[in-house]
Image (tube, rainbow, N blue to C red):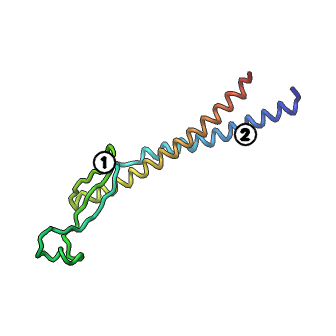
Amino acid sequence: MSRTRASRSGVRRRQQSGALQRHAQRFRELKRGLEQLDYFCKGTVLQRMMKCGKAHCACASDPTKRHGPYFELTYKANGKTVNWKLSPQAAPLYQAASLQYRKVKTLLYRLEKLSHTILRHQAKLAESNHPD
C-alpha cells in the first residue's frame, strides 16, 4: 500500500471520528431534553359550544347563544376516536400535557435519526479498522 493512500485513509478515519464525536455530543444534548419534560398525554383539547336540544331555547336558532364552553380531550386509541369531557380547571392541564406529548414525539424522532447516523459512522469505522 502506498504512503499517500495510507495517509488519506488516516485522514478520512479522523474526519469520521470527529463527525462521530459531534453527533454523539448532539445525542447527549437531546437526551438531556428528555429530563426536562413534564407530564404528557396524547390528544387535542377542544373547546365546544353546544346546542341543548330544546326547541324554544335561543341556542337552537342563534349560534352565538349556544351553551358552553365545554372542554374535551380527543385522541385515537385502537383506531377509534376517544373523547373525554374535561372541567374548565382541568382543560389547561391537559392542553399543556398535549403540547409536551408533541415535544416528546419530536425529540424521539430527532434521537432516532441521530442514532441511525451515529450507527452508520460506527459501522464505517469498524469496517475500516478491520478490512477483509
**Residue at the image position 33 percent from the left and 46 percent from the top:** 79
Could you say whether the residue bearing mark 1 is in a helix, strand or loop?
strand
Mark 2 and mark 1: Cα distance apart in space: 50 Å
Q: Tell me which residue sits at (38%, 50%) in the image.
A: 101
At 74% from the left and 21% from the top, the residue drawn is 132
Give x and y (percent) for residue 86.
22, 57
- What amino acid type should be assigned to the residue bearing mark 1? Lys
Q: Residue at x 25, y 65 (%)?
A: 48
Task: Indicate left or right for 119 with 39 as reference.
Answer: right
Residue density around tag 2, few if under 14, some if 14–19, many if 20 or more, within 10 Å:
few
Residue at the farthest front position: 55
- Where residue 130 is drawn, which disc sits there? none
Examine the rendered structure and indicate whether residue 76 appears above or below residue 11. below
Q: Secondary structure at mark 2?
A: helix
- Residue designated by label 2: 15
In the displayed structure, 80 sits above or below 63; it is above
Which residue is under mark 1?
A: 80
Q: Nearer the viewer, residue 58 or 27?
A: 58
Q: Amino acid at mark 2?
A: Gln
Left or right of residue 124: residue 26: left
